[in-house]
Image: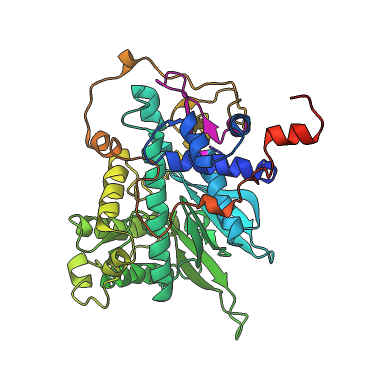
Amino acid sequence: MKLNVKNIRYLAADDWRVLTAVEMGSRNHEIVPTPLIAQIASIRSGTGVHKCISSLAKIGLIAKVKNAKYDGYRLTYGGLDYLSLHTHTKSKTVYSVGNQVGVGKESDIYVCADETGKQLILKIHRLGRISFRNVKANRDYLRNRNSGSWMYMSRLAAMKEYEFMKILRREGFPVPEPIGQNRHTIVMSLVNAFPMRQISTVGDSAGLYAELLSLIVQLAQHGLIHGDFNEFNILVEEKANEEDDSQPPTLIPTIIDFPQMVSIDHANAEYYFDRDVACIKRFFSRRFGFTSDEPGPYFRESIKVVKKRLDVEVEASGFSRKMAKDLEIYMKSVGVDGDGGADEKDSSNEADEEDELDDGVVADVSGDEEGFGAEEELDMPPATEYKANETLLSSLTSSLTVLDIRDMDPLPSLDEVKPPPKPTISTKAAKAKAGWSI
């Protein structure tokens, strides 16, 4: 799904109350009943609730499932995007959103700006996107690939990445500055650099190679392994030599993308470490024609001297071990725990070629980016098409909903929106005062 923020300025206070009510109702319901939405939103006029629901469904922020057993709506990724941006706006983190500058396997990258006009980066996690091929093949929309679990996992990925960015930035590692995080989005500083995969030649390939391998070792000595350390997740910035202009510019690498980062205590820590090293060696050999004559580095030698256990510190900061385990199981199940750049990450392009499925429920083949109309319904496949295939992912997602999470990012409070004023006079008294015949 592509981010379309042109409608966010037209949402009234009641619209935000209803959208927040759908999100809160998703705690216990995959499809939130309409009466429950009205109850949570606490809008006095019953017709006002239905009007808001119709408006939100028209622009694709909520959607209705046709074969549901009761009348209700579910939150879409578009609705989650709007709620997240609304929170960022209230906290004055984001003032405007610009063009899309990148598409990952499981995320979208946009340029945004704060109130001062400073350009920032908005990263929106969208776990579940590369599963669309399996969805279309298996027609398993509700059990193994339900939208609630995708939103839950996207939120976990954003939380994990934000926590790692904060702690790595504090320790002096070359990572973007984290500005804010809400739900499945992260706002970070804009790095004036190019992805290493776009660079054809460098002046000092040996120096850059040594610095990147040194970063892998330093991460391990701090208790962490990136897990997807390759040319796609490394930005290279050129900094001119101010003292001597004749000298070639200095290359400064910046590491990005941390949802798959693991601890050195992980069962497959050595495998991920060796894979990160192999990715850098393979890329420098193919792209720059540089091959080091020194073996290694090796995992066991790197962790002989552990300077600090940042992995333990991140776990203590709110991202619990259970959250990390849930996210790891999910990412392994759908194959997004890092591919080492072996296939040039063609899935980034495939995401644009595959007709932008809306939350894994139905393909929008019409190309209409406005979302589903108020009267349109999402047609679900008949129950006979489901296959009894109990997998590890199925057991995980069956117990997860959009908001089944305890963290430092609480649900938005409806108290922030003032309810409509109550009448000071009864209807009967008002008619009598107006001279009506009662």
Hey, which quadrant is residue 290 in on the image? bottom left
Q: Does the magenta stretch include residue 68?
A: yes
Residue 230: % across, % down: 39, 56
In this rendering, the count of numbered labels is: 0
Residue nearest the viewer, comparing 405 with 173: 405
Hey, which quadrant is residue 205 in on the image? bottom left
Residue 250: % across, % down: 52, 74
Residue nearest the viewer, comparing 186 with 105: 186
Q: Is residue 397 magenta?
A: no
Residue 132 appears in the picture as rendered: yes
Residue 76 appears in the picture as rendered: no
Residue nearest the viewer, comparing 408 with 71: 71
The single residue placed furthest to the bottom in the displayed view is 243
Residue 392: % across, % down: 22, 37
- Along the horizontal axis of the image, is 433 left or right of 188? right
Q: Which colour scheme is used?
A: rainbow
Q: Residue at x 69, y 67 (%)?
A: 116
Residue 202: % across, % down: 50, 65
Q: In the image, is residue 394 above or below residue 417?
A: above
Hey, which quadrant is residue 269 in on the image? bottom left
Residue nearest the viewer, comparing 369 with 48: 48
Q: In the image, is residue 174 above or below residue 387?
A: below
Q: In the image, is residue 205 above or below residue 344?
A: below
Magenta-highlighted residues: 53-77
Q: Which residue is drawn at 49% across and 37% down?
A: 39
Q: Residue at x 56, y 69 (%)?
A: 238
Q: In the image, is residue 167 above or below residue 42?
A: below
Q: Residue at x 79, y 27 (%)?
A: 436
The single residue placed furthest to the right in the displayed view is 435
